Structures are given as C-alpha cells and as structure tokens.
Image (cartoon, rainbow, N blue to C red):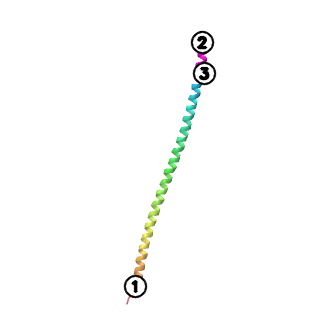
Amino acid sequence: MVNRNLQQIAADLQENQKLEQAQQEVLTAHRQLQEQNEELLEAELMLQAETQQVLQAQQLVKQEHQDVQKAQEKLQQAQAAAMSLQNNPIQ
C-alpha cells in the first residue's frame, strides 16, 4: 500500500513537472506573440505615416498641376493678344 502511494506520488510529481513545463512553453509563446504584435503595431503606424505623406505629396502635385494649367492659360491668352496686335497694329 505504501509502495503504491509512493508510486502515485512519483507519477503525480512527474505529471506536475510536465504541466509546469507546458505552462512555461505557453507563457513563452504568449510573450513572443506580444512582441510580434508590438512589431506589427509599429509597422502599421509607420505605414499610416507614410500613407499620409504620400497623400500630402499627391495633393501638392495636384495643386502644382492646377498652377501649371493656369499659367498655360495665361500664356495662351498673352499669345492670342500678341497675335491680335500683330494682325491689327494700332494706328
């Protein structure tokens, strides 16, 4: 009977050691997931910042394109006025 109890205690201790090892592995995996999650969050923030920069650059290009179009229109008006003056000199 005592021998059987000792065997059971030994088996329980062995099982407890296995459970503790498994628990440590779970905690390690959890820490690794947390680290990866933090890295992903940092990458997401960087991506958002870079996306914002791209959007701002696109807006700047759009504004510059509009400025160029206005300048081209003024140039065409000036050219038309110059042609008109050449064709109809002031008398």
Mark 3 residue element: helix
What x and y, as percent, mark residue 21? Answer: 59, 28
Image quadrant in which the C terminus is located: bottom left
State the residue lying farthest toward the top: 1
Residue sitting at 59 percent across and 19 percent down? Answer: 11
Q: Mark 3 = which residue?
A: 14
Quarter occupied by residue 36: top right
Of the residues tagged 3 and 2, which is closer to the observer?
2
Of the residues tagged 3 and 1, which is closer to the observer?
3
User: Are there few (<14), some (14-19), or many (20+) residues within 10 Å of tag 2?
Assistant: few
What x and y, as percent, mark residue 68? Answer: 45, 69
- In the image, residue 50 above or below residue 30: below
What x and y, as percent, mark residue 4? Answer: 60, 12
Label 2, label 1: how many angstroms apart (C-alpha)? Answer: 120 Å
Residue sitting at 40 percent across and 85 percent down? Answer: 85
Name the chief secondary structure element in magenta. Answer: helix
Residue sitting at 60 percent across and 10 percent down? Answer: 2
Q: Which residues are magenta?
A: 4-12
Label 3, label 1: how many angstroms apart (C-alpha)? Answer: 106 Å
Left or right: residue 86 versus residue 31 is left
Q: Mark 1 = which residue?
A: 85
- Which of the labelled discs sits on residue 4, or is there none? 2
Quarter occupied by residue 1: top right
